[in-house]
Image: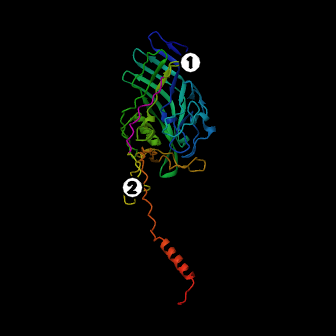
Amino acid sequence: MTSAAAEEVPDGVLTVTDAQLRWGLNNESNNTAHAPGTTNFFSAGKVPDPGGGGRTLRQQDWSATAGAVRIEKQRPDGSYATATWAGLTTTPDGAPLGSAGEARFSQHQVVIDGGTGEVDPVAGTATISWSGSFTVLYYSGMTMFYVADPVLEVTPSGRRLTAVVSEFAGDRTDTGTWEEVAGQRVTLAELPEADLAGEKGFSATPAYLRVRHTPSGDEVAQTRTGAWGAFPASFLRHAERLGVAPFFYSTGSSTDRFKVPLPVTVSWDAADPQPLPGEEQPEETPPVEEPELVPPPGPGPDPTSPSPPTTPTAPATDEPTPAAPPTSTATGSSPSPNARTREEAVPVAAPYTAVRQAAPELAPASAPERRAPLWPWSVGLLLTAAALALPLRRPG
């Protein structure tokens, strides 16, 4: 359990000098965004202030590394390597991510080395601090926030990962408003368990499923079906000010199951990291049964009969909407800053049952009109002509 970066002192306390924190946050942060042509992803460090809402991040402003922080992408063999700009929009095997609901993710993780602190497996306590920051970007940067200087705090009564979260906020009624929100240390993850006796570290999935959340103000209400839940309350309260809270609790969105947090992995020594756990998707909400569509009988619809049922659309839900672009540098159109509009789910085609319609029986063709035979008239004419040809006899 000892190494150059993790030394065990006589009383059993482990002193760490290069601990590693690794976390992909959630799959929604590695997914295609709902705004056309945009993606959700991470950047190492703090990306530059865009100067206004609704602007997508330029490649030159994105970073894979910044100090002790780096963004890594999963490779086809399951290992991880430093991320690239092109890889933000592809799966590990290089395929396009597809639509937001396809469950195909870019599989990136934020990795921070250089953590320092102490771990006491016997007492069940630990404190490890990291220095560095990263940016979480949605809609290719139209909405974003910063995460800085995370701290792992483990006590016998609780286990949590905190960090300083900040951002720039706008006003959905005034597109010219753009101001920095002061950073606040919040709880990013509550860890139900953390095995401090692990030789190399531990992995733990943060609490989320069945965690209740009551939004404030006009935020969308939490839905409690399927893979429902919420990130910690202190983070969500601050995220409401930033306009990104609905990415971190169930809102009835078609991508709710992707909001569930991924495992947090802490390694005592960055040079000898803790093995990563397998990441499984939570069970999807059972699909709603759709009514069967049956075509009307006959060659065409009967105008006197009622119209066939139409396919119902999935219920509209609220997602944070990127701020409206004040200049032409934005990609695509978007509503006012931090406004929340209703995400219209694409309706799923209902099962269609074809009805084999028998061809209509053809009525027999009408019989032609009967006419009188012509032969009696022909015989009469011949006899008349023969009589006229005989010589006339005079009486003797």
**How far from the left and from the top, in percent, is residue 142?**
54, 43
**Is residue 280 one of those drawn in magenta?**
yes
Question: In the displayed image of the protein, which residue is found farthest to the right?
Answer: 60
| Dominant secondary structure, magenta | loop
At horizontal 52% and vertical 51% (from top left) the residue drawn is 175
* Residue 59 lies in quadrant: top right
Closest to the observer, 189 or 379 = 379
Secondary structure under the numbered disc 2 in the rendered image: loop
Closest to the observer, 174 or 214 = 214
Give, as a three-letter code, the residue at label 2.
Ser
Q: Is residue 257 above or below residue 347?
A: above
Which colour style is shown?
rainbow
Q: Residues within 10 Å of mark 2 (few under 14, many from 20)?
A: few
Asked if marks 1 and 2 touch (Cβ < 8 Å), the reply is no
Give, as a three-letter code, the residue at label 1.
Ala
Closest to the observer, 73 or 366 = 366
Pointer 1 or 2: first along the chain = 1
At horizontal 47% and vertical 41% (from top left) the residue drawn is 242
Image depth: mark 1 or mark 2 in front: 2
In the drawing, what numbered circle is on residue 307? 2
At horizontal 40% and vertical 14% (from top left) the residue drawn is 122
Q: Residues within 10 Å of mark 1 (few under 14, many from 20)?
A: some
**Is residue 278 one of those drawn in magenta?**
yes
Q: Which residues are magenta?
A: 277-290
Question: In the displayed image of the protein, which residue is found farthest to the front?
Answer: 396
The span from disc 1 to disc 2 (Cα, nearest Å) is 68 Å
Q: Is residue 236 above or below residue 157?
A: below
In the drawing, what numbered circle is on residue 271? 1
**How far from the left and from the top, in percent, is residue 10?**
46, 9
